[in-house]
Amino acid sequence: MISNKESLSAEDLEDLKPALKTIKRRSEGLLDFVKDYRLIAELPTPNTNEHSIGEILQHIKVLMQSMVNAKHIKLQVLQTSSKISLKIDFKLVEQALINLITNSMYALDDTANPIIEVTYRLAHNKIYFDVIDNGKGIDAENIEKIFVPFYTTRTNGSGIGLTITRNIMKMHGGNLEVDSKPNIKTIFSLVFNYT
C-alpha cells in the first residue's frame, strides 16, 4: 500500500488503519502463543516432598473458594482430614488442580445448580484426585482432542491447561484421566501411583 509513494492521501490512511490493526492483533496473538508454548515446554523439575492428601485438598479449598463463589458455583471439597501422604511437588500439583477446577467453572456456564466436587479415592494401588462437575461435559469425539496442545472450545481459552496438567502428572509418574457424560457428570482425575 505504501510502496513507491512519497506521501499518503486521507483515503490511503483510512485503508491502512484496518491493515495495521490486523498486523498488531496477529503480533499479539503470536506473542501469546509463544508465551503459552514456553509454559508447556519449560515446566520446572519437580521438587518433591511428602504432603498429606488432606493438606492438599484443604489448601485448594481455601485457594479456590472465593473464585468459585463469585460465579455462584457450589464447591465441595471432601476428605480434607485424610492423613495419607504422597511424595509430590506441592506447587505443581496445586497448579494441576487449579487448571481442572478452572475448566470446570467454564463448563458450568449456563448450568442450573452448578456444583464442583473435589475429592480423592484409593483404588488398585493408585490415588485419584477427582474434580467432578455437572456442566456441559465433553462429547466422545472431542475426548482425545482436549489433550492436544492449543485445542480449545472456549472463546478466550489458550488450550494449554490440560496439556500442562498432563505433563505435571507425567513428571510425577502418574496420569490424567477423564470420564464425561455431557450435562450429567464429568470427572477429571489426577492419578498417582501409591504402593
Image: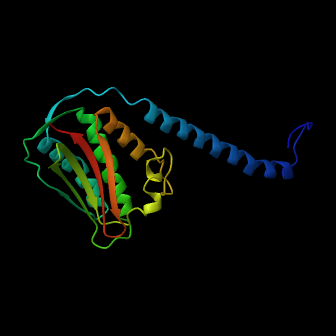
Q: Which of 3 and 132 is in front in this view?
A: 132
In the displayed structure, would residue 74 be above or below residue 96? below
Q: Is residue 48 left or right of residue 16?
A: left
Q: Residue at x 25, y 51 (%)?
A: 64
Number of dots carrying numbers? 0
Q: Nearer the viewer, residue 11 or 40?
A: 40
Q: Which residue is drawn at 23% across and 54% down?
A: 65
Residue most extreme to the bottom: 112
Q: In which quarter of the image is residue 6?
A: top right
Q: Residue at x 85, y 49 (%)?
A: 12
Percent of width and height locating residue 10: 85, 50
Q: In which quarter of the image is residue 48?
A: top left
Q: Which residue is drawn at 50% across and 50% down?
A: 151
Q: In this view, does 17 lie to the left or right of 89?
A: right
Q: In which quarter of the image is residue 29?
A: top right
Percent of width and height locating residue 71: 32, 62
Q: Nearer the viewer, residue 116 or 72?
A: 116
Quadrant containing the C terminus is top left
In the displayed structure, would residue 99 be above or below residue 34? below
Q: In this view, does 5 lie to the left or right of 151?
A: right
Render colour scheme: rainbow
Residue most extreme to the front: 124
Q: In this view, does 179 lie to the left or right of 192?
A: right
Percent of width and height locating residue 79: 11, 52
Quadrant containing the N terminus is top right
Percent of width and height locating residue 41: 45, 31
